[in-house]
Image (tube, grey):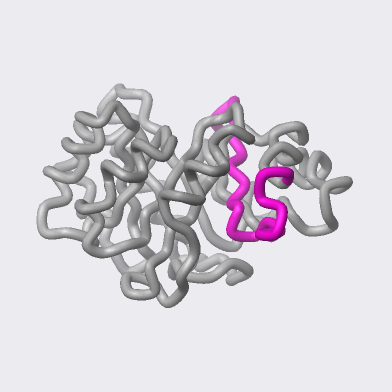
Amino acid sequence: MPRNIKIAPSILSADFSRLGAEIEAIEAAGADLIHVDVMDGHFVPNITIGPAVVKALRPHAKKPFDVHLMISPVDPYLDAFAEAGADGLTVHPEAGPHVHRTLQHIRKLGKKPGVVLNPGTPIEAIDNLMDLVDLILIMTVNPGFGGQSFIESQIGKIEAARKRIDATGRNIALEVDGGITPETARRAIAAGADTLVAGTAVFQGGPSRYAANIAALRA
């Protein structure tokens, strides 16, 4: 079991009227990364934020911005999100014609490239990308909305991703996002995850609960 579990609160579940303060609060409560969900209403059925908001939030955070781009086409926006302050940019194979080239470009921008697999995307989609990525994200819900239930069939995909990462000998993060609670967190970690994205489970109860919520996931 991985020793160092990282918690990446998803600001999708934060109070959008005070996002800067929310980021400061979750960092003080023990967050390791800030997970930023970018949605376009086209690739996924929801619209969230763009580069201008990422840029505005950057001064409020000391931790890395883990930016998950649920947008298609994704390539025209990589430079803008990099310039806005993203530390990692994670993309879907379905979001452009040449995911290999997309990941190369993210690296060229000096950012950490990541690839994300939706519940219906086969694990084999990463087989020719392992040398290009610093992060693999397994979605345990269909992306678009917070508060969904964990899809059990994805546990096997987390295990398969862990085997592929271990075979490379490289330090590639294995992130899981969707329906993460203290109970599903344990199962994801047992399957090989080392980074947990959580929205509702972190932000429920307000700022006075954030530290306890993060600690419960890490346990």
Q: Is residue 19 magenta?
A: yes
Residue at screen point 14% across, 44% down: 100
Residue at screen point 48% across, 59% down: 49
Q: Which residue is most to the right?
A: 208
Query: Which residue is more in the foreground, 115 or 23?
Result: 23
In percent of width and height, residue 183 lies at: 69, 55
> Would you say 129 lies left or right of 135 here?
left
In percent of width and height, residue 85 lies at: 43, 35
> Would you say 112 lies left or right of 24 here?
left
Residue at screen point 54% across, 60% down: 178
From the image, which quarter does the N terminus lie in?
A: top right
Q: Is residue 204 magenta?
A: no
In percent of width and height, residue 202 lies at: 72, 51
> Would you say 184 lies left or right of 58 here?
right
Residue at screen point 12% across, 43% down: 101
Query: Which residue is more in the foreground, 142 or 191?
Result: 142
Q: Is residue 167 above or below residue 214?
A: above
Q: Which residues are magenta?
A: 1-21
For residue 192, say whether it is visible. Answer: no
> Which of the 4 quarters of the picture holds residue 56?
top right
Q: Is residue 61 above or below residue 185?
A: above
How many circles with numbers are drawn on the protein?
0
Query: Which residue is more in the foreground, 102 or 135?
Result: 102
> Which of the 4 quarters of the picture holds residue 181?
bottom right
For residue 43, say whether it is visible. Answer: yes
From the image, which quarter does the C terminus lie in?
A: top right
